[in-house]
Image (cartoon, grey):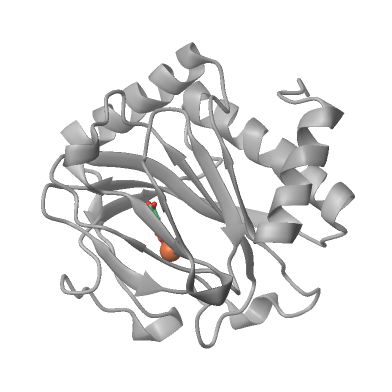
Amino acid sequence: MNSFFSEDNWVGWVDALSENHYVVIDHILPKQILLDLKTSFDERVEAEALRKAAIGTLNQKQVDRSVRGDEILWLDKDMADQRIHTFFDLADEIKQNLNRYCYLSLSGYEFHFAHYPEGAFYKRHLDQFQGRNNRLISMILYLNEEWHPAYGGQLKLFLDGGKEETIMPTFGRMVMFKSDVLEHEVMITHHDRYSITGWMLYQPVGLSFLETS
Ligand SMILES: O=C(O)CCC(=O)C(=O)O
Ligand SMILES: [Fe+2]
């Protein structure tokens, strides 16, 4: 497998993740790979393959536009799309390195395309929710070629001591944070906002029967 990053990269990122609970990485992938991913995303928006995102877990899912207004499409390794396979190569490398440098036991991941249309937001929440605690690291890769502060749509992280960090969803920026500790929100966007969002998962051996979806 090709390697996207060097060991030095990882040392800095892992330090930030363990000290601050989050890390922001700009230009995570070469521009052409990002553009290809965005094209793949655009094709699926065009084909109306995305669905309104739900909240809740397992058999308690519901769509509530007053909590989150994005539409999503789950990515699958069976998709015959080399552009998505390249993204999964990146995810594999990140998973291996988080296991190696953070001593985690990540055994899988899940990702979806997410499109926030104008006026959409996602209220303050934690990604690790009741009844499902196997999301360890949240990862978001932004695919917005031009982003202006006036568009809004920032990711706001609620940090220790009442501090907040506000992050613009600029092209090629990846944010990783600890799913079980960092509350966050997506502020209202005034422009179409595109990302690949996902989670590094810890799946205790033998408990997979608990997953019904
Ligand atoms: O798109 C973002 O910046 C964050 C999305 C998010 O919080 C989520 O999907 O759980
Ligand atoms: Fe979230």
Q: Is residue 9 above or below residue 159?
A: above
Res 151 seen here? yes
Left/right of residue 208 with respect to residue 175 in the rendered view? right
In the rendered image, residue 123, in percent from the top left (x then y), is placed at 29, 70
Which quarter of the figure is the N terminus placed in?
Answer: top right
Front residue of 1/104: it is: 104
- Vertically, is 209 above or below 178? below
| Residue at the image point whose x is 49% and y is 67% from the top | 163
| Residue 192 visible in the picture | no
Image quarter for ligand 1 equals bottom left
Name the one closer to the observer, 195 or 171: 171
Quadrant of res 11: top right
Residue found at x 17% / y 32%: 46
Q: Nearer the viewer, residue 108 or 100?
A: 100
Query: Where 120 falls versus 144 (above or below)?
Result: below
User: Which residue is located at x 45 percent, y 49 percent?
Assistant: 197
Residue 97, image x, y percentages: 80, 43
Between 210 and 141, the one nearer to me in the picture: 141
- Is 171 left, or right, of 83 in this rendering? left
Q: Residue 64: image x %, image y %?
A: 19, 75
Q: How many marks?
A: 0
Residue drawn where x is 47% and y is 36% of the image? 79
Task: Kindly give the residue lying farthest to the top in the view shown.
Answer: 32
Relative vertical location of residue 105 with respect to residue 205 in this rendering, above or below: above
* Left or right for 109, reference 166: right
Q: Position of residue 153 (x, y in %)?
A: 26, 49
